[in-house]
Amino acid sequence: MKIAVLCSGRGSNLLALLEAHAQGKIPGAEFVAVIADSRDAGALNIGREYGLQASVVPRAAFHANREGFERRLLEVLAPHEIELVVLAGFQRVLGATFLDAYPGRVVNIHPALLPAFPGHMVWADEVQYGVKLAGATVHFVDAGVDSGPIIIQGAVPVLPGDGPDELAKRILAVEHRIFPQAVAWLVSGKVTLAGRVAALKGFAPTPEQISQTFVWPPLED
Ligand code: GRF
């Protein structure tokens, strides 16, 4: 399955995907292109190192013209015959112009346990709110903001004294684990969608797996 990755920044999630792929953990995936919305994005070099075609579609060049920006993204992607678009730290909301071209074929990673804390820069909000569990979500992209069907979530504890940076670091580690897993499931056709509920074909967790619930602060027993 031919995959394009859209990024805006350093690209650690892109790297996690490419490393997992290099280790044979995403069978059937072919990462062919990385597009960044800024030429400063570190993700471009990571993509190049792994042999992806790296392109820049500078958002700044389109000002208030989101449709034009999305049409340009589609033009850049078109020759690659992409089957899955992965948003890995892509700081733009995509609308119908883009999404209609890849129905059910765009996924995103978000650094919170959705539907809590959608949007940008969520870590400070999580700390201020006092949540005890934070985490990350991989989800299909719909026309809303971080509102599409959830494929996988990973939880991490929020520790006393955590600031946004400490929390972001802990969440990023779980992002790097769940994103390659989600993409592997998508590539192998394991993910089904009924309404807004995504599920895994043949999913039959063992009682031991089900008991691995994450309670925080830990129970005293
Ligand atoms: C990640 O925290 C991701 O969840 C968010 O932006 C950050 C991107 O980091 N959407 P990186 O560029 O993958 O290192």
Image (tube, rainbow, N blue to C red):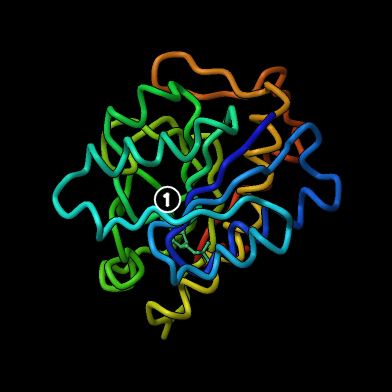
Residue 137 to residue 121: above or below = above
Furthest residue toward bottom: 161
Residue 35: x %, y % from top left: 49, 51
Determine crowd level at label 1: few under 14, some 14-19, many 20+ residues with C-alpha closer than 10 A: many
Nearer the observer, 55 or 183: 55
Task: Residue at 26% x, 36% y: name it.
Answer: 144
Nearer the observer, 214 or 91: 91
User: Would residue 207 be found to the left or right of residue 94 on screen?
Assistant: right
Residue 74 to residue 35: above or below = above
The residue under label 1 is: 113
Nearer the observer, 26 or 76: 76
Task: Residue at 56% x, 63% y: name it.
Answer: 44
Furthest residue toward right: 24
Three-letter code, disc 1: Leu
Nearer the observer, 4 or 109: 4
Residue 9: x %, y % from top left: 46, 66
Q: Is mark 1 within 8 Å of ligand 1?
A: no
Residue 153: x %, y % from top left: 53, 45
Could you say which quadrant of the image residue 71 lies in? top left
Residue 167: x %, y % from top left: 46, 73
